[in-house]
Image (spheres, rainbow, N blue to C red):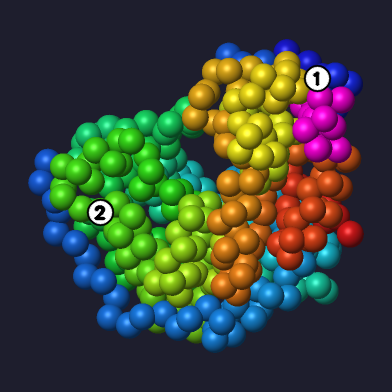
């Protein structure tokens, strides 16, 4: 059963008191809920050039509109819609890496977007910190703890996603082998990769495995991203690497040198992890607003449910905290992309204006990233 969620005027009034001029209802429709350390793959021999000196970073500097769409049902109608759009860059799932979709013509889709009247950079979405049980690499016998590097269940409740000890050889080999997933992405013609779950080093189950294995999970993630970058550039000059979330790593110059850009989800708006609601839940604006009575009271019923049931959700994190790290990265010359989950037109307009004012490149869509949205002028 589908039910339309209204925008609460009380929510808007309360947020205005907190300095927000946005709508905080859930727009549109929504569904009602229902061992030992492995030998390491050697680190790549060469170090990536600093971001400011790479032609790939210069290409990203020209991007003003980007699309984030990882729905596997990437039909020809949507492909043509994207091709005809004014988007400069698109992030798509590498559909053939999904079980049952090996025959999907990904290379043709990438080429179509490259050859569009308004050509697009095309990046492959990859989850480097989680194993996904719908990918071609997944084995039927796998479960949490077997192999030993599968650390636990997804903390946000995404079924089929499992945080991993990404420093283990078996996981790294899935990506870095000569015929691994990264090599396939290069062969397909993608311009680079969009790395998700870079923040895996903060997951409690990953932390437990790191302690058991005697490794520093932050150091291992920096090394992991660096090795992915080096692998791609060794095979395709100008190969792009955008790292999503974990913006606090921008404090490290060695990390900044390995990525072309940083993307941050839900800087200002989020939705439920189950896409219920699909967006329009405003984050606390400042650290002082976090977990305050006024902030909770400002939320719509759907957003308050998300806030109450998950004390670790982004609704318990401030925009101020994210912006501190993003501005630091921006000031180091790193392009910043923001991905907010909102659908109400007034919220979308506010996000675009605010993000652009800060020198960032915004995107706004549904939490599930399952629908095409037109570029905002």
Q: In this view, does 165 lie above or below 16?
A: below
Residue 90: x and y in percent read 67, 61
Taking the spot 16% from the left edge, 47% from the top edge, the residue there is 213
**In this rendering, does residue 136 appear at all?**
no
Residue 223: x and y in percent read 32, 65
Left or right side of 269 for 246? left
Mark 1 or mark 2: name the one nearer the start of the chain.
1
Q: In this view, does 175 lie above or below 282?
A: below
Instruction: Look at the numbered disc 2 and give the secondary structure of its residue.
Output: loop
Q: Looking at the picture, tell me which residue is in the foreground, 200 or 312.
A: 312
Taking the spot 69% from the left edge, 75% from the top edge, the residue there is 61
**Residue bearing the label numbered 1:** 5
Q: In this view, does 257 lie above or below 1?
A: below
The quadrant of the rendering that contains the C terminus is bottom right
Left or right side of 128 for 115? right
Read off the magenta span: 13-30
Q: Distance between the residues labelled 1 and 2?
A: 44 Å
**Residue bearing the label numbered 2:** 216
Instruction: Look at the numbered disc 1 and give the secondary structure of its residue.
Output: loop
**In this rendering, does residue 4 appear at all?**
yes
Q: How crowded is mark 2: few (under 14 residues within 10 Å), some or many (20 or more)?
A: few
Give the quarter of the image for residue 283: top right
- Main SS category, magenta section: loop
Q: In this view, does 191 lie above or below 323?
A: below
Residue 154: x and y in percent read 42, 33
């Amino acid at each position: 059963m589908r039910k339309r969620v209204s925008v609460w005027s009380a929510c808007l009034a309360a947020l205005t008191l907190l300095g927000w001029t946005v709508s905080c209802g859930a727009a549109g429709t929504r569904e009602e809920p229902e061992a030992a350390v492995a030998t390491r793959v050697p680190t790549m021999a060469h170090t990536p050039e600093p971001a400011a000196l790479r032609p790939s970073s210069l290409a990203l500097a020209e991007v003003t509109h980007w699309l984030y769409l990882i729905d596997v049902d990437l039909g020809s109608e949507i492909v043509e819609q994207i091709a005809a759009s004014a988007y400069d860059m698109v992030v798509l799932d590498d559909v053939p890496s999904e079980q049952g979709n090996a025959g999907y013509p990904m290379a043709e889709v990438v080429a179509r977007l490259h050859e569009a009247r308004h050509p697009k950079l095309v990046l492959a979405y990859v989850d480097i910190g989680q194993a996904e049980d719908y990918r071609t690499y997944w084995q039927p016998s796998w479960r949490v703890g077997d192999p030993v590097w599968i650390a636990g269940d997804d903390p946000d409740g995404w079924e089929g996603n499992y945080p991993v000890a990404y420093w283990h050889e078996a996981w790294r080999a899935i990506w870095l082998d000569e015929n691994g997933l990264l090599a396939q992405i290069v062969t397909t013609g993608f311009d680079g990769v969009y790395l998700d779950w870079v923040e895996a080093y903060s997951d409690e189950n990953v932390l437990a495995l790191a302690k058991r294995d005697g490794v520093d999970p932050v150091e291992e993630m920096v090394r992991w991203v660096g090795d992915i970058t080096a692998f791609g550039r060794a095979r395709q000059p100008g190969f792009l690497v955008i790292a999503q979330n974990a913006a606090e790593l921008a404090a490290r110059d060695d990390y900044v040198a390995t990525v072309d850009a940083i993307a941050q989800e839900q800087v200002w708006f989020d939705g439920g992890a189950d896409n219920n609601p699909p967006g329009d839940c405003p984050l606390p604006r400042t650290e002082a607003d976090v977990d305050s009575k006024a902030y909770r009271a400002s939320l719509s019923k759907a957003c308050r449910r998300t806030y109450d049931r998950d004390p670790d959700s982004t609704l318990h994190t401030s925009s101020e905290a994210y912006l501190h790290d993003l501005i630091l990265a921006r000031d180091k010359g790193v392009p910043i992309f923001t991905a907010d989950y909102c659908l109400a037109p007034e919220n979308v307009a506010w996000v675009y204006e605010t993000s652009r004012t800060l020198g960032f490149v915004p995107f706004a869509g549904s939490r599930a990233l399952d629908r095409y949205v037109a570029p905002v002028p």
